Amino acid sequence: MDSVFSLRRPYDLIGLLAQEERAQMVESLKKELLQRKEEIDRCEDQAQDVEQRLYAADHDCLIAAQPLTEFDLYVSTVVPFDHKVKSHSDSLPEVTPEPNCSKVMDLSFSMHAFEHLAGVRERHALNMTPEAGLHRAVSTIESTQEFGYQVYKAMAKNNSSWVIFNLAAYYWREKGAAAEAVECVRRALHFSPREHKDVALISLGNILHRAHLSEEAAIVVHAAVDTAPDNAICHFTLGNIYAVLADYNKSVICFENTLKVQPDFKNAKQRLHAVLCHSKLEAALEAQHNSLQRMLGQLHEYQERRELWLQKSEQLIGEQASPERTLEQHVLYQEHRLRQKPNLPHTGHSCFQLERNGHALLSCNVNHIPYHVDSLHDLGLNQQFVQAVESRASRLIHKVHLRGPSGHVEQCRRT
């Protein structure tokens, strides 16, 4: 019988005691590793894709019908007003002039134009995406070129109209020319009566937001809300801005205010629930990320303990006698027993004496059951699995929005 206590030096009592200690440690480490592996497997089951579960079952996610990331949070908004630009029968000139607000009226500074904002001061450095079809909100004209020409003609007749400057800003927003659009908005704000300043403020807020200056856009749109608290577009625009800033509490309040002013605003309702859903998702992803980080710690601890287990197991086997030496010891032991009791030829666990061709023989059946280290398949952790967990934790860091301070941006107030 192969045994870890069948030593290379059977006479070494100290070695035998040390071998016993090693055997106990190996067995203890094995039990610890099995327990740790069960805990890691359980953590892995709990860390499955929370995103799919949330989208499939959460009330807000179901009402939103799609993730917040699939909504256009830079959607163009305009405040409608009564003036409509109509097409005239005269044909367009070969070179169509554009409504250049800076040429029509010089305005180096205005107290009404939010000159303290970097986006307004450094307007020539702004970049924004074009807002296609924007002029159709205030005109029946199909062509952007013709719309710009009609605004140009109106501006030539009246260079102090807040309405015309707002229309010119729409033209430049549609062209994606941020600097020219801001110039027109500055003049619109300069001439607008207080009760109509929300038109230009929402326009400026859109420009700054689409130029990725969303915190400055929030300041401007808050001013629009103060001017026209009953205007649903102002609250809606602010809700989109705060969603981009990942300030979900304020975004929710703004969309709720939108629905108070206009209960049938379906797009605002969807976005409200999408923000609530996304907020829950971020919390769940953060929790999952923390869980994966803990799992990584457990994995590294497991690997260290496993290395120790392998080391002690090798030492345990290294002190064991070879199979040949074990067989020799076993035969000697059986011979000794036979000499002690010659009348019991078949005494012994697996040896017996027989005669063949006049010679006495001792035949032993030795069951060779070697002590072996449990297979790495049972106790080992696949290195690819460890790398997969590390990769997943890394992706979650990028997936989770780590919200920074909101700075000087005002808070959304419930109406």
Image: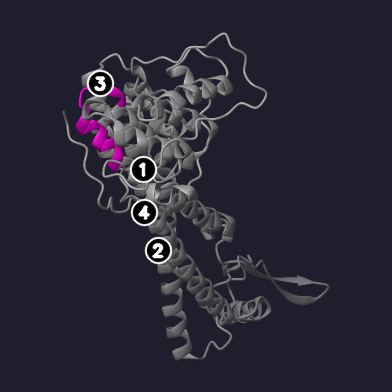
Residue 254 falls in image quadrant: top left
Q: What's the distance in space between the residues labelled 2 and 1, CA to CA?
A: 35 Å
Q: Amino acid at mark 3?
A: Leu
Q: What's the distance in space between the residues labelled 2 and 4, CA to CA?
A: 24 Å
* SS label for mark 4: helix
Classify mark 2: residues with Cα within 10 Å, few (<14), some (14-19) or many (20+).
some
Classify mark 4: residues with Cα within 10 Å, few (<14), some (14-19) or many (20+).
some
The tally of labels here is: 4
Residue 59 can be seen, yes or no = yes
Q: Amino acid at mark 1?
A: Glu
Q: Which residues are magenta?
A: 219-233
Residue at the extreme front: 157
Q: Which residue is mark 3?
A: 259
Sequence-wise, which precedes: disc 3 or disc 1? 3
Q: Nearer the viewer, mark 2 or mark 3?
A: 3
Q: Nearer the viewer, mark 3 or mark 1?
A: 3
Q: Residue at x 22, y 26 (%)?
A: 195
Q: Which residue is mark 2?
A: 32
Residue 91 falls left or right of residue 232 = right
Q: Which residue is mark 4?
A: 290
Q: What's the distance in space between the residues labelled 2 and 3, CA to CA?
A: 58 Å
Tell me if residue 16 comes above or below residue 140 in the rendering.
below
Q: Main secondary structure of the magenta part?
A: helix
Q: Which residue is mark 1?
A: 282
> Residues at badges 2 and 4 in contact (C-beta under 8 Å)?
no
